Amino acid sequence: MIFLSIKTDQPKAEVALLVEGEPKVELTWEAHRQLAETLHSKIAELLKANHRTLKDLDGIVCYKGPGSFTGLRIGMSVGNALAYGLGIPVVGAAGSDWQEEGVARLATGENEKSALPEYGGEIHITKPRK
């Protein structure tokens, strides 16, 4: 089984390939405000470097929070969209062992179909001035 994990809760973003029986292969970068512009290309870079394609994926694990409102929203949206488009399951997980938890849930056939973020507090959205 081959799973993709996505963690975008901080300025340093992370994507990883979790292949059964093999060491985790991850790619991290300082995404800051370019997360939406760089996430897809970093996923493609990770897959290509490991001789894989999106079609090889069996599921996606997204870090669901707490963390940056915009970062989590972008990471979860990309994870959900890829899972939907590829017809594979997606789950969200939190905590220090989020990848292991997510892989265990995917291995049992769990599929949230639309993983949702947990921001860890009230969301602060500025009201329009008009």
Image: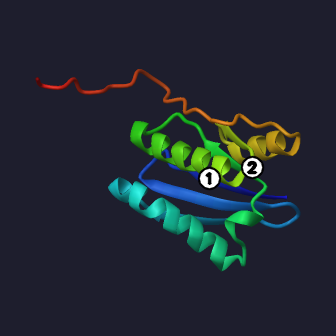
What amino acid type should be assigned to the residue bearing mark 2?
Ile
Quick check: 65 left or right of 123?
A: right
Circle 1 residue:
82
For the residues labelled 1 and 2, say whether their Cβ atoms are less than 8 Å apart.
yes
Residue sticking out furthest to the left = 130
- Asked if residue 43 is positioned above or below residue 103 in the image, the reply reads below
Q: Secondary structure at mark 2?
A: loop
Q: Reply above or below: 109 against 59.
A: above
Near mark 1 (Cα within 10 A), the count class, few <14, some 14-19 or many ≥20, is some
The colour scheme is: rainbow
Q: In the image, which disc is placed on residue 88?
A: 2
Cα distance, mark 1 to mark 2?
A: 8 Å
- Residue 24 visible somewhere in the drawing: no
Q: Is residue 23 above or below residue 103?
A: below
Mark linked to residue 125: none
Q: Quadrant of residue 17?
A: bottom right
- Residue 57: horizontal and vertical position, in percent? 75, 60
Q: Nearer the viewer, residue 77 or 63?
A: 77
Residue drawn at x 41%, y 52% is 11
Residue 80 in view (yes/no)? yes
